[in-house]
Structures are given as C-alpha cells and as structure tokens.
Image (spheres, helix red, strand yellow):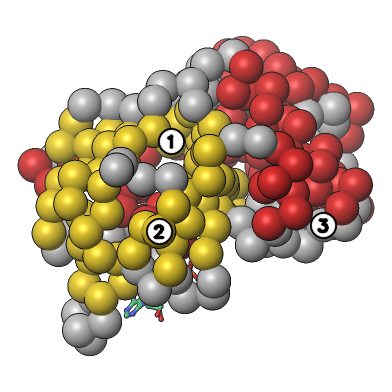
Amino acid sequence: MIRFDNVSKRYENGHEALRQLNFSIAPGEMCFLTGHSGAGKSTLLKLIMRMENASQGQVFINGQNLSRMRAGQVPYLRRNIGVVFQNHQLLFDRTVFDNVALPLLIEGAEPNDIARRVRAALDKVGLLKKEKLNPIMLSGGEQQRVGIARAVVNKPPLLLADEPTGNLDPQLSAEVMHLFEQFREVGVTVLIATHDLGLVARMGHRVLTLHHGELVNGGDV
Ligand SMILES: Nc1ncnc2c1ncn2[C@@H]1O[C@H](COP(=O)(O)OP(=O)(O)OP(=O)(O)O)[C@@H](O)[C@H]1O
C-alpha cells in the first residue's frame, strides 16, 4: 500500500528532514511512526498525501508513483486517504453531522447517500446520538472520535493519524487506538505518528522509528 524507495526530503531552506528512507507497509497492516520532535514524522505523512514532494527517491501509494502524478490527480489520491489530526480541526459553527459529511459534500455525493454514510461512520465511533450537537459541546475524546468518523466516512483504504491521542488521557487514548484496530480488522491500512511510546509498546504492531530524518528501526534491511 505504501512504499518508500530511497526517499529523501530537503526543504527549500536546505534542511534535510528525511534521509534515504526504505520501507513498505502492506495493505491491511497497522504501523506506528515514532521519533523525537523534529525527527521527520509529519514530513513523512505529508509526502504520502503529496502535500510535499520527495527531493530524491520514489513514493508509491497503491502502486502509483507520486512523483509521476499530475497535479490534477492529487485530489483523487487524497480521497483514498483518511487523515486524523491531534487538534482534529473540526468546524465549530456546524453540527457533528455536518462535520462528518464534509468529505462527502466535497466529493459531490447524493444527500441520501450522505445521510446514510455519515450515520454509519458516527455509529462506528459510538456518537450516533450526538449528530445534532455542535462539537464544542463534546468532550475532547468525543471530538477526536468525530475527527475519526470524518476521516473514514468515505471508506478510504488508507488511514493516517498525526498524534491522534496527543491531548487525551490514557484511557481515552486506548479507546481511540482500539477504534484504529477495528478499521485495520476490516482491511484498512493504518499509519499512526505518535510520541506515546507506552501505548505503542502495548499495541504490539510494527514500529518505524525516525531519528534526525533517518529510519533507525522498522524499515527494510
Ligand atoms: N516547511 C518546512 N521548511 C523547512 N523546514 C521544515 C519545514 N517543515 C518541517 N521542517 C523541519 O524538518 C524537520 C522535521 O519536521 P517534522 O515536522 O516532520 O518533524 P516531526 O517529527 O513531525 O516533529 P513533531 O513531533 O515536533 O511534530 C524539523 O527540523 C522541521 O523544523
């Protein structure tokens, strides 16, 4: 599903954020991405979404070489990738339902289809009864679950998360991780960037570790 072939990323200011990464993540695999602050985790996720381009090497997503992808194809790539952020980036002037519906509206889905799929996603994260509320009325853990429902509402085969449990207490973090596990069980590929090494150790999945832009664990040997 994801393959990095000798990928380096140098930003315009000359900073080399990633150095010669080689790894692959199989379809349906769940992996963690760890490393100190500034190690390059967010940069790696940005390359997968083609928010940044590799300076060297090739990134393949679902067999597609991102460096050969035309700009017009990028929105189609992103439809296949659900993204969960630490600060969940919800819109506080809309209901929970409308927040989750957003990717489907952008896709131009039919209203009946939207209602059905939004409710299915909210059901999965246990928030069906809160669809009419404004997210500001929800707890931090519930807001994060709304963010997850929005990320999976169009059933992307790939789910990326950047510090999804950063603001949550250990119990809520475990619940959020359990949700990711459930997506993996139905075949979704999941890559989670996190500082929470305790949580990572408990989950028992493969861990990719970055250190100053180099992959020091979990990559190809
Ligand atoms: N647009 C940019 N231009 C120049 N340098 C950048 C840019 N974005 C990130 N960097 C630098 O690249 C390095 C890696 O940053 P990145 O955000 O990928 O790290 P991270 O592991 O996600 O860190 P954190 O855990 O703190 O979010 C850092 O030194 C950062 O300052």
Q: Tell me which numbered mark, 2 or 3, is placed earlier along the sequence.
A: 3
Q: Distance between the residues labelled 2 and 3?
A: 28 Å
Foreground disc of the pair 1, 2: 2
Mark 3 nearby-residue class (10 Å; few <14, some 14–19, many ≥20) = some
| Amino acid at pointer 2 | Val
Q: How many numbered marks have been drawn onto this rendered protein structure?
A: 3
In this orientation, which residue lies closer to the viewer: 105 or 27? Answer: 27
Q: How far apart are marks 3 and 1 (CA)?
A: 23 Å
Q: Tell me which numbered mark, 3 or 1, is placed earlier along the sequence.
A: 1
Residue 93 x/y as whole percent: 73, 56
Residue 80: image quadrant is: top left
Split into quadrants, the picture shows ligand 1 in the one at bottom left
User: Contact (CB < 8 A) between labels 2 and 3?
Assistant: no
Residue 100 x/y as whole percent: 65, 36
In this orientation, which residue lies closer to the viewer: 164 or 146? Answer: 164
The residue at 41%/22% (across/down) is 27
Say which mark, if any, is on residue 168: 3
